[in-house]
Amino acid sequence: MKVVFVLFQTRWFKSLVTAILIFILIYLISITNFIFVPVGAYIAAIAVPIIGAGFIFYVTNPIVNYLEKHKIPRIAGIIIVFLLILLVGFLLVNYIAPIVETQFNKFINNIPNMVKQSKTVVNLWQDSQTFLPEQVLDYIQEFTNNLDTYVENITGFLIEFIGQIFGFVFSFFLIPFFLFFMLKDGDKFVPFISQFLSEPKANSFKKLTTSINHTLASFIQGQFIVSICVGVMLYIGYRIIGLEYSMTLALFGLIMNFIPFLGPFLSAIPAVLVAFFQEPMTAVWALVVMVIAQQIESNFISPNVMGRVLKLHPLTVITLVLAAGGIAGFLGLLFIIPAYAVLKTITAHFYQEWKKDQPQNEQNII
């Protein structure tokens, strides 16, 4: 009997029981998912406004805090921030959006000519390469025959991407309301929850929320500043080399830069293709512009703006981005890294709390 009792007290047995209970809980949730359907629908309905307001909150909250430190009432600071947002929106709608719309429509209308040129180039190159193996020639022929399909897929991706952007924009009318109360009462959330907890748990909760807030703020603010800098550098570089659709391609690069690691490579593809059909040498210069912009960003801007707050290994980033892209598409690419960083912060916090509860001689076993 004593042996059985000792067995029950071992760490591996407790871990096994915990794992079994987690799987039982997952199974029970799966067979009672009808209970959670309304909850999921509610979360989906408010997800876009909350995420959008949260993103803008982390970008604008430092401005409100700065104004408050300089004796400006918080409400007045929030009004100033909203006026700045309206000013930025006015400039975008009246000066940038028309240029982007014109360039994008011109690009869509020019796609058939680009396809025709590419087929001609491939056929000329194929005729001059008589020494190539037959399998390679067959592959080139198959690629040429299916070029229209590939272009349609790329165009479909661009249209779907723009559709998702407009879907976000359509839900943005709720964002100002969420943003206002986040800026006004965001600092009251932790004290409100802490009053229902014991002092040790309240302190632990405050520490956890501070870590999560620091992680999200570092990522969102840093990524926002870095992406703006990259977009401006790309636009200047594209204008210098005379690349067509420079504003549209620079904005595409700005948005893609929100995708860690893979974003710069994804943004380079359309720029190089457009430059190649404009003038082959321009494609080389477009690639040079991309490399220079990314080198400046990775060596000077990101280290000073974001530092190493997230502490994510590049292989981890690549794995997460690829998996999220396959599961959730473009939205998964955008949100997987901050979601993983928050989950890592939460796990590390509870692991440290668990270690403090262990006997002194067992804290360094794992």
Image: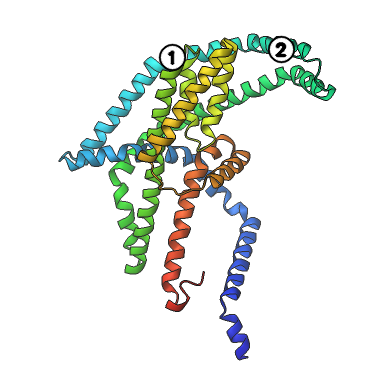
Residue assigned mark 1:
239
What's the residue at 61%, 43% (across, down)? Answer: 323
Q: Earlier in the sequence, mark 1 or mark 2?
A: 2
Residue 114 coordinates in the image, percent (x, y): 63, 11
Position of residue 271 measured from the top left corner of the image (x, y, whole percent): 54, 20
Seen in the image, is 350 located left or right of residue 176?
Answer: right
Give the structural element (helix, strand or loop) at label 2: helix
On the picture, is 82 further left or further right than 118? left
Q: Considering depth in this image, is 362 or 42 the residue closer to the camera?
A: 362
Camera sees residue 257: yes
Residue 224, given in percent of the width and then of the height, sits at 40, 34
Residue furthest to the left in view is: 71
Q: Residue at x 32, y 25 (%)?
A: 86
Question: Which quarter of the picture shows residue 57?
Answer: top left
Task: Inspect the image, locate mark 1, and give the three-letter code of the amino acid beneath it.
Answer: Arg
Q: Which residue is mark 2?
A: 119
Q: Dot 1 surroundings within 10 Å: few (below 14), some, or many (20 or more)?
A: some
